[in-house]
Image (tube, rainbow, N blue to C red):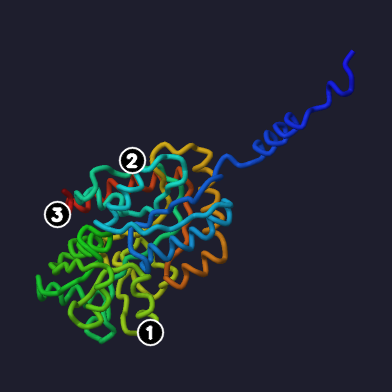
Amino acid sequence: MLTRRAIRPTGVFLAIALATAASAQEPAYPKRGNVDLTVLFPAGTSADITARLLAQGMSKFMNANVVVVNRPGAGGAVGYRYAAAQKPDGYAIVWNSNSISTTHHSGQLAFDYKAFDPVARALVESPLLVVRSEPRWKSLSDFVIDAKARPGVVTVANSGTGSHTHISAAALARAAGITIVDVPYGAAQVVPNVLGGHVDAMVMLPAAVAAHLQGGKLRAIASLTPARDPTLPDVPTARELGIDVALEAWRGIAVPKGVPAPQVAMMEAAIRRTVESTEFTQGTEKLYVRPAFLGTQAFGELIAKEDVELARIMQAIGLKK
């Protein structure tokens, strides 16, 4: 016959039982260290500012510390190489963009988008053709007429060779039947050189020029997007004038190939909640950036489809290696 003492758990067994129960309640992910978010471009850029807004929300909704680390260089290739080489455990993520395709097809990156698994898209941005506010060109039509009259003379700056803005500018020129001079500055040099009159125009993303658009020093004369940007409703698209170019920029989160599906699903849910939050919406609105969530499957389909299109465009304008 068993005594009461015989069935009473000892202190050791009780400790083990409590530890096991606590362990079962702890989330399998994330439970250690920081989640490292690689940003491909320098601090202060739209990529950096929006990444930090996203990281704040993800940290809150994942109960983790998502830390932005800027790893710029080679149009994003430096950051992609770093991120792709990390262990697929969910603690290394990358703020990816169209640059995953442009860096690959321009020869700066040996691997393509398939080195990563998509998690979710967070936002989109509109490449803009921007000029100084003096009344030299009041519209895209004025710009095209002048460029046709002076082939190879009009200069258009962008944020670097092979960048999304470079490809957008070159695609615009090709679609419009004009010959321009591409000026691939570093991103920080573009706006000062246009303001200073050293370059005629630029193709840039809205965040880089937002303050000067609001202050009246610069004017956007065309949006290179499929439809008018609701944050810039008065700016016509190139397509409205019959110039068939539409190269919307997007940003989202990807992870090294092989991260477990439950971890990807947790990140996807945190990104959705962040993108739908008031804090994210208000933060991006100031930069003329549009929250635009896409889940894992739809985001992956977008990347694959666009990769083919960008390769075609880059081949046509002589930028594909």
Q: Which one is nearer the viewer's eye here, 26 or 166?
A: 26
Q: Which one is nearer the viewer's eye here, 227 or 205?
A: 205
137 up-or-down from 310: above or below: below
- Residue 175 visible here: no
In terms of sequence position, does the residue under pointer 2 or pointer 1 come before the other? 2
Identity, as a three-letter code, of the amino acid under mark 1: Gly
In terms of sequence position, does the residue under pointer 1 or pointer 3 come before the other? 1
Q: Which disc, if any, is residue 114? A: 2
Left of 26 or right of it: where is 32?
left
Identity, as a three-letter code, of the amino acid under mark 3: Gly
Question: What is the crowding at mark 1: few (fewer than 14 residues within 10 Å), some, or many (at least 20)?
Answer: few
Identity, as a three-letter code, of the amino acid under mark 2: Lys
Marks 2,1: beta carbons within 8 A: no
Circle 3 sits on which residue? 318
Left of 156 or right of it: where is 252?
right
- Label 1 – label 3 distance at C-alpha: 37 Å
Circle 1 sits on which residue? 215
Quadrant of the rendered structure where residue 47 is? bottom left
Residue in the picture at 84% in, 21% down: 6
186 up-or-down from 198: above or below: above
Image location of residue 120, percent across then percent down: 46, 49
- Label 3 – label 2 distance at C-alpha: 24 Å
